[in-house]
Image: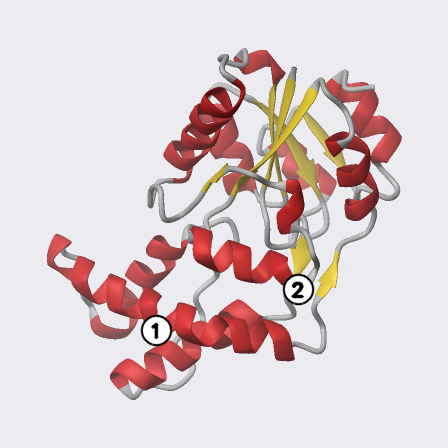
Amino acid sequence: MKLLLFDLDQTLINTGGAGLRALDRACLHLFGISNAMQGISPHGKTDPAIAREILRVRFDKHTPESNGEIRLILDAYLSFLKEEVEASAKYRVLPGITSILDEMSARKDVALGLATGNLETGARIKLDRGRMNRYFAFGGFGSDSEDRTELVRKAAEKAAAQYGKTIPASDIFVIGDTPLDIDAGKRAGFQTVGVATGSYSMEQLLDSGANVAIPDFDQGRDYFLRSTFVA
């Protein structure tokens, strides 16, 4: 069995900035500050790590005692996220994703999971608009760990529990659009696939250590299947 672990933002979907707007609204609501995410890149980071960075950049807070405030930010973020996702004019499922997920979910020798820095509740909200939760019974999330490598490992552990057997590391593929996705997969000991549907090119993803890189799942479908030995 092959285990395919997908990142979410800019790999499966583009929410059109819904998550950033929800974080900005959360910080305005809690702290009275506007544009809290200005100058902070969310790419490849977990939600808790982003909230921690907001506290460091905006308030110079970076101690373990900040954990309570991180929870407040994330709870407020989730309260605004559904509205932002539903209202987002630029929300879209990325090229080739529905087709590849339909094909892979129909196979008995392939398991699908998530490996995303999103809190699980946030991930489910984002996927719901594109009717994509049906593909993913389990995953590793930012709510499992602030550390991306650990949440990738958690996803593999959940797959083992789901299927009653451990899947060899050589048959686990972490699929994402940032070097942080690739680094986490490599550190976990798994194979990595870069998808250039975000802010990084195929060359940059390969330079970061990706075993395979494709432009998207429309143009790169056949190469992805050959390279991962799924076909």
* Residue mark closest to the camera, 2 vs 1: 2
Would residue 195 appear left or right of 167 to someone viewing this image? right
Q: Residue at x 43, y 24 (%)?
A: 157
Q: Amino acid under label 2?
A: Arg
SS assignment at label 1: helix
Residue 121 to residue 33: above or below: above
Residue 37 in view of the camera: no
Residue 212 shows in this picture = yes
Q: Which residue is mark 2?
A: 129
Q: CA distance from mark 2 to mark 1?
A: 20 Å
User: Is residue 221 placed above or below 94 in the rendered structure?
Assistant: above
The answer to whether residue 227 is left or right of residue 88 is: right
- Identify which residue is drawn at 50% across, 12% down: 165
Q: Could you say where residue 207 lies in the image, as x and y percent from the top left?
A: 62, 33
Mark 1, Cα crowd under 10 Å, few <14 / some 14-19 / many 20+, is many
Q: Is residue 92 above or below residue 119?
A: below
Numbered circle sitting on residue 76: 1
